[in-house]
Image (cartoon, coloured by chain):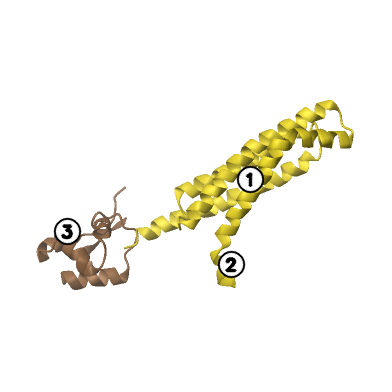
Chain colours: A brown, B yellow
Amino acid sequence: MEIRINLDVMMAKRKIGSAELAERIGITPANLSILKNNKAKAVRFSTLEALCSVLDCQPGDILEYTREDN
Amino acid sequence: MQDWLKSKSILFSQIGVVLFALLLAVLDLGCWRIVNWFVALRGMGGQAVWGILAVLLLCSVFGWVLLWALWRLLGNLRQARVFTEENIALLQRVSLCCAAAALICVGGCFFYLPFLIAAAAAGFMALIVRIVRNVFQKALDMKNELDLMI
């Protein structure tokens, strides 16, 4: 079971690059890369709020819950 | 006053390490004389000289390694590098040095029984430092997890 962050799809829809997105939400490009590659252990609400604000979307549009089948 | 003491805390620790290093150097250089004097004072056999000398010199080797590890650790702390793999390795080294000294002192009991007290003290210190190492390891794990909180 895991929570995945699907930023690439929303970034492509809004035609915004990684560097610009990182700058607009106030995190480093390295941290944005950690988010995009699903290496993050946790996401702050403030970061999630900034993402939704910049990408003009709902949390559900970028967060996905997947259940791994055994 | 408290802030001043706090800011100088690491410096005081470094001074302590230097003082112990000086003490160890004096012991190493004067080992032969000190041991001969002690053995003559206690009226012990000639074999005891070599036994006690061996214990002191072997412990001294680990003592120098331990002091160097403490010096490196304090240097890292001064540069605000606290919870790092290097510091955990240094603490492990300190613990192992204490444990080694404890074992050597146990061996030295055959020549001079009170070495048993030094063995117990060194063994206890090894345990304390090992627990501190465990704390640092846990703190590093938590820090790594926090670093991955975006």
Q: Position of residue A16 (x, y in %)?
A: 12, 64
Q: Determine the secondary structure under disc 2.
A: helix
Label 3 lies in what chain?
A
Q: Determine the secondary structure under disc 1.
A: helix
Please name the amino acid that badge 1 sits on.
Answer: Ala
Q: Position of residue A57 (x, y in %)?
A: 17, 71
Give the labeled residue for mark 2.
Answer: B5
Instruction: Give the left or right position of residue A47, taking residue B32 as reference.
Output: left
Please name the amino acid that badge 3 sits on.
Answer: Asp
How far apart are the two marked residues, 2 and 3, measured between alpha carbons? Answer: 52 Å
Q: Is residue B45 above or below residue A17?
A: above
Q: In terms of depth relative to the viewer, which is nearer, B53 or B135?
A: B53
Please name the amino acid that badge 2 sits on.
Answer: Leu
Q: Position of residue B83 (x, y in %)?
A: 47, 54
Structural crowding at the residue carrying mark 1, measured as other residues with C-alpha within 10 Å and reported as few (<14), some (14–19) or many (≥20)? some
Q: Position of residue B84 (x, y in %)?
A: 45, 51
Label 1 lies in what chain?
B
Residue at (56, 58) in percent of width and height: B11
Residue at (88, 37) in percent of width and height: B41
Instruction: Give the left or right position of residue B48, taking residue B8 as reference.
Output: right
Residue at (55, 45) in percent of width and height: B69
Q: Is residue A47 visible?
A: yes
How far apart are the two marked residues, 3 and 1, measured between alpha carbons? Answer: 58 Å
Give the labeled residue for mark 1.
Answer: B21
Give the labeled residue for mark 3.
Answer: A8
